[in-house]
Image: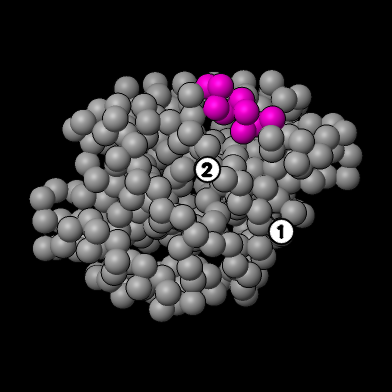
Amino acid sequence: MNIKWFSLVLLALALSISALAQSLETTLRGLSVAEAQARVEAAVNAQGLKVARTLNLGGQVKNFRADFPDYLLLVLEPEAGVLAAVQENVMTAIILPPTIYVHAARPGVVTVGTFDPDLMFGMLGVKNTKSRLLGAKLKAIIASLGLPQRVAPAMMPDPSSGMLPAMLYKVEGASVEEITLLIESELGNNGLNVLPTVMMGPVAGIQPCKSEWAYQMFTTQPAGGFAAPCRFFVAPMPDGVLVGAIEPMLMGIMPGVAQSQPTMGMLQEARRVMSQIIESVGGQPYRPGQ
């Protein structure tokens, strides 16, 4: 599996920022969240895709803060485009399998969105035909529901920062099964709810969620749901495993996030906890090409 350098900045310089979007969404009016969910599931099925699981994030977070809106996360089943993307660049596991969020934006208005494949696959260097077809299907799902709208980044990362979309660690002499179980245990010990592991070929996808983090992030920027639940992955290497997790600070480029001190503080806390969890199972920081 190739692990490619983070080229988002180069792509951003080549394209107009108005043409880029982290999230591609549409607005449904006059529907309940349940009615919107039914329409989304029908649109997913029409594209030959399937919903593997639905996380009632709103219900979970309401146990922590009652003022959180209804919010669903529909995680799709891995298919050929997912497997091909992970094979081409294992870091795509931070957004795969795709999540579609269904958000009660205000009374009578529901927004539905997912990641924009033009930006996300572009920044991760995914060019294979099967993944491109998956991207086209995701765009078709949103377009079939209503007029697509792009939630464009408010800014782009500093080219000199060296930030990757995933935090990467290597565990010498370990197996995917062993490290997956250890990470799931540590996530639970740190107060995160963990969904059953998703296998994308030989790569294990781990999807935890923490109500406090979700409340702060999605209250500030609901369109960030394309990256939820929080993604970890464990991939085989010749002499051990590669462990990765979505880089929380990447969400700072979404509109309104960098301007919110509590949200940026939450992202920093999430990064610290996620790093500690991976290091606790033997992870050593890793850079592509090492």
Q: Position of residue 213 (x, y in %)?
A: 39, 29
**Residue carrying label 1:** 201
183 relative to 1 in the view: left or right: left
Is residue 75 or residue 263 the one in the foreground? 75
Relative to 121, is 25 on the left or the right? left
Q: Position of residue 282 (x, y in %)?
A: 76, 24
Q: Is residue 229 visible?
A: yes
**Residue 18 appears in which quarter of the rendering?**
bottom left
SS at circle 1? loop
Q: Residue at x 36, y 73 (%)?
A: 43
**Is there a contact, CB below 8 Å, between mark 2 and mark 1?**
no
Name the one closer to the observer, 181 or 163.
Answer: 181
- Vertical placement of 212 versus 238: above or below? above
Q: Is residue 221 magenta?
A: no
Magenta region, residue range: 182-190
Side (left or right) of 230 relative to 153: right
Dot 2 or dot 1: first in sequence order is 2
Image location of residue 70, percent across then percent down = 24, 45
The prevailing secondary structure element of the residues shown in magenta is helix
Q: Is residue 14 visible to the viewer in this orientation of the structure?
A: no
Which residue corresponds to the image point at 37% horizontal and 34% vertical from the top-left?
214
- Which dot, 2 or 1, sits closer to the camera? 2
Where does residue 77 sit, x and y in percent of width and height? Answer: 54, 62
> How many badges with numbers are in the image?
2
* Image quarter of residue 27: bottom left
Q: What's the residue type where badge 2 is placed?
A: Leu
Label 2 and label 1: CA atoms lie apart by 18 Å
Q: Quadrant of the N terminus?
A: bottom right
**Structural crowding at the residue carrying mark 1, measured as other residues with C-alpha within 10 Å and reported as few (<14), some (14–19) or many (≥20):** some
**Which residue matches tag 2?**
195
